[in-house]
Image (tube, grey):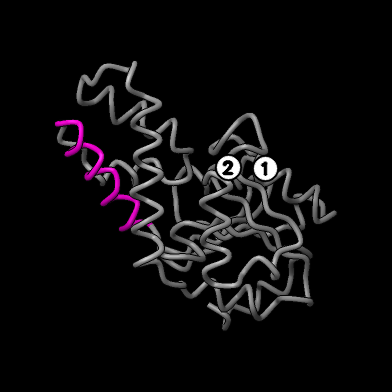
């Protein structure tokens, strides 16, 4: 990824967290399946990949609707998912290649983290890898009203690092996050296929 000299063209870099900088997706998928088992529903962890970048509440609602689970259990589902997820990511999370980009451009360009994760979970991961120090700004699910694919997460990141959106490059692994970056008027690097997507704006 670092061989891509085009990264130098941008004034600010914004990174998604789960599945982009830190490999947590298998742990989160497993946690959803464990929650389903606990309540007696066949939750499919693959839904997480369909909704990558969405906050836990949105994923929980979709999971419950697909399996006709009473929505009055929503808070219990979210709480248990966070507990299982926390345990699994502490055991199994690892850094991905985009983490090398973060380290390489630290103190060379302003860097921001824009995640759909709940702040305490993001903090656990940042502490685990001692990664918080690299980011001038961190925007989590609680910090904005409209989540990915809305552009708010990345626009807030750009605002905090004081870089115009069109001068930012977003690193993402999820379809919702990619759309959010493009909706923000930013170019997006899809880390799944190592491809640069130019904003139509």
Q: Nearer the viewer, residue 4 or 60?
A: 60
Kindly identify the residue that appears in the image at 58 percent across and 81 percent down. Answer: 2
Residue 29 within the magenta-colored segment of the rendering:
yes
Q: Are marks 2 and 1 in contact (CB under 8 Å)?
A: yes
Disc number placed over residue 98 in the picture, else none: none
Main secondary-structure element of the magenta-colored stretch = helix
Task: Relative to 54, say whether 20 is above or below.
Answer: below
Task: State the extent of the magenta-drawn residues as a range.
Answer: 25-40
Q: Could you tell me which quadrant the C terminus lies in?
A: top right
Circle 1: element type = loop
Question: Which residue, given by chain and number where applicable, does mark 2 sit on?
Answer: 180
Kindly identify the residue that appears in the image at 64 percent across and 78 percent down. Answer: 103
From the top left corner, tell me how far across and down residue 43 is, in percent: 21, 37
Kindly identify the residue that appears in the image at 20 percent across and 37 percent down. Answer: 38
From the top left corner, tell me how far across and down residue 54 is, in percent: 47, 39
C-alpha span from label 2 to label 1: 6 Å
- For label 1, count other residues whose C-alpha is less than 10 Å away and answer few (under 14), some (14-19) or many (20+): many
Question: Which residue, given by chain and number where applicable, does mark 1 sit on?
Answer: 184
Q: Nearer the viewer, residue 60 or 86?
A: 86
Does 62 sit left or right of 120 as displayed? left
Does 97 sit left or right of 28 as displayed? right
């Amino acid at each position: 990824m670092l061989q891509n000299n085009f990264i130098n063209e941008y004034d600010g870099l914004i990174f998604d967290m789960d599945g982009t900088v830190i490999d947590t997706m298998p742990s989160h998928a497993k946690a959803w399946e464990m929650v389903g088992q606990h309540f007696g529903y066949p939750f499919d962890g693959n839904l997480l990949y369909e909704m990558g970048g969405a906050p836990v509440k949105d994923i929980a609602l979709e999971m419950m609707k697909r399996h006709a689970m009473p929505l009055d259990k929503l808070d219990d589902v979210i709480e248990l998912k966070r507990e299982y997820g926390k345990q699994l990511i502490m055991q199994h999370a690892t850094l991905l290649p985009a983490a090398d980009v973060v380290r390489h451009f630290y103190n060379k360009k302003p860097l921001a983290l824009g995640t759909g994760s709940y702040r305490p979970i993001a903090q656990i991961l940042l502490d685990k890898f001692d990664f918080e120090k690299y980011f001038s700004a961190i925007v989590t699910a609680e910090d904005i009203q409209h989540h990915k694919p809305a552009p708010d997460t990345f626009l807030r990141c750009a605002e905090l690092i004081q870089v115009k959106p069109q001068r930012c490059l977003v690193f993402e692994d999820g379809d919702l996050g990619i759309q959010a970056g493009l909706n923000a008027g930013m170019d997006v690097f899809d880390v799944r296929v190592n491809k640069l997507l130019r904003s139509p704006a």
